[in-house]
Image: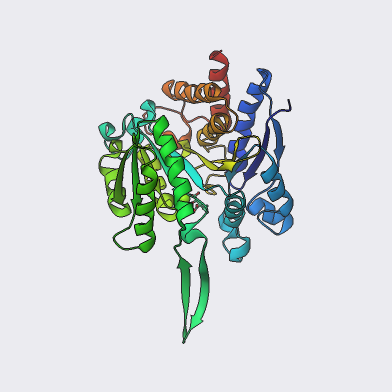
Amino acid sequence: MSNPSLLILPGDGIGPEVMAEVRKVIDWFGTRGLTFDVSEDLVGGAAYDAHGTPLTDATMAKAQEVDAVLLGAVGGPKYDVLDFSVKPERGLLRLRKEMDLYANLRPAQCFDALADFSSLKKDVVAGLDIMIVRELTSGIYFGEPRGIIEEGNERVGINTQRYTESEIDRVARSAFELAMRRNKKLCSMEKANVMESGVLWREVVTEVGKDYPEVALSHMYADAGAMQLCRWPKQFDVIVTDNLFGDLLSDAAAMLTGSLGMLPSASLGAPMANGRPKALYEPVHGSAPDIAGQGKANPIACILSFAMALRYSFDQGDEATRVEKAVEKVLADGVRTADLLGEEGVTPVSTSEMGDAIVKALGASV
Ligand code: IPM
Ligand code: MG
């Protein structure tokens, strides 16, 4: 049997630095006989610099063929002046759309060792473990009509929130399936009080819920949901929501845990011929251009994204847990990158030292 294939797209800013640490983890698995066919390519600003487009057709085709894609981050101030159609973010959005990665899993988990880093009180966040399922290929991010048009003597900016029943149905099913594997609790968030797309969202999710009678389903307006996430996040287990609300709510949830530098994500589509879902894994954080190239970035989110790939694409749940435990161990030992500082007298380690510490902890785990 051939090795599972993985396409690595480091991207921009801190992307290449954190990806270098993931490579160490991948190499470690190689020494244990779990070998991946890894290829690497450009995305975002890096692809624009080389090819004048944030994602070439060749890279897109490669992404469609591999078992999983692992992406670092895209974007940076250097590209702010570019036309919208070639901005780095368009490369990522094209991958999501053309691979049809409709279910974006964003866990927000608070590591015990970091409970003090949250801007919320420790007892509010300690032990937090929630999962946001964000719809990723539709809604206002992609709806037509869109654009900036002339109307009378001024311009109008237009975007369209649009959801079909089948789009809501499939992401709701992903969320219910996850809820079944977790604590059988699902909260759906929309704005059914103001938006027709929200009314339909609520109806369809309720209908899908009939196939999952064991799951306790609740509904919340997304603004109230944001408030409840800050007030008492532990009331939630799985949250399912649309593309734009999911973008906002997942950033808020991420910050509850103390650092954006910790959180991975998985974007999953329909199963391929081999039964594996189409999949792209990426950290929730961005390209952090302000610290890029200085060895300050935290590689944990990207390493945990690879762990999610082990679990969801490669049927290696135990090895995924091994990586997560190694991260926990390193944090419990007090190893901190600069984003995690707060304690007196702790000197930060570099990106690469954090990667080495995690690989060492992996070694000690066998
Ligand atoms: C995210 C990001 C992206 C989004 C950007 C980079 C296009 O904020 O993954 O949350 O808005 O979806
Ligand atoms: Mg975002």
Indicate the position of residue 357 as horizontal and vertical percent values. Answer: 54, 23
Indicate the position of residue 308 as horizontal and vertical percent values. Answer: 53, 33
Task: Looking at the picture, tell me which residue is in the foreground, 183 or 361.
Answer: 183
176 over 146 or under it: above or below? above
Residue 285 makes an appearance in the image? no
Indicate the position of residue 84 as horizontal and vertical percent values. Answer: 58, 65
Q: Quadrant of residue 94?
A: bottom right
Task: Looking at the picture, tell me which residue is in the foreground, 212 or 12.
Answer: 212
Task: Looking at the picture, tell me which residue is in the foreground, 208 or 88.
Answer: 208
The quadrant of the rendering that contains the C terminus is top right
Q: Is residue 105 left or right of residue 66?
A: left
59 over 123 or under it: above or below? below
Q: Quadrant of residue 346?
A: top left
Residue at screen point 45% across, 58% down: 163
Q: Is residue 229 left or right of residue 51?
A: left
Residue 94 makes an appearance in the image? yes
Colouring of the image: rainbow
Indicate the position of residue 23 as horizontal and vertical percent values. Answer: 64, 31
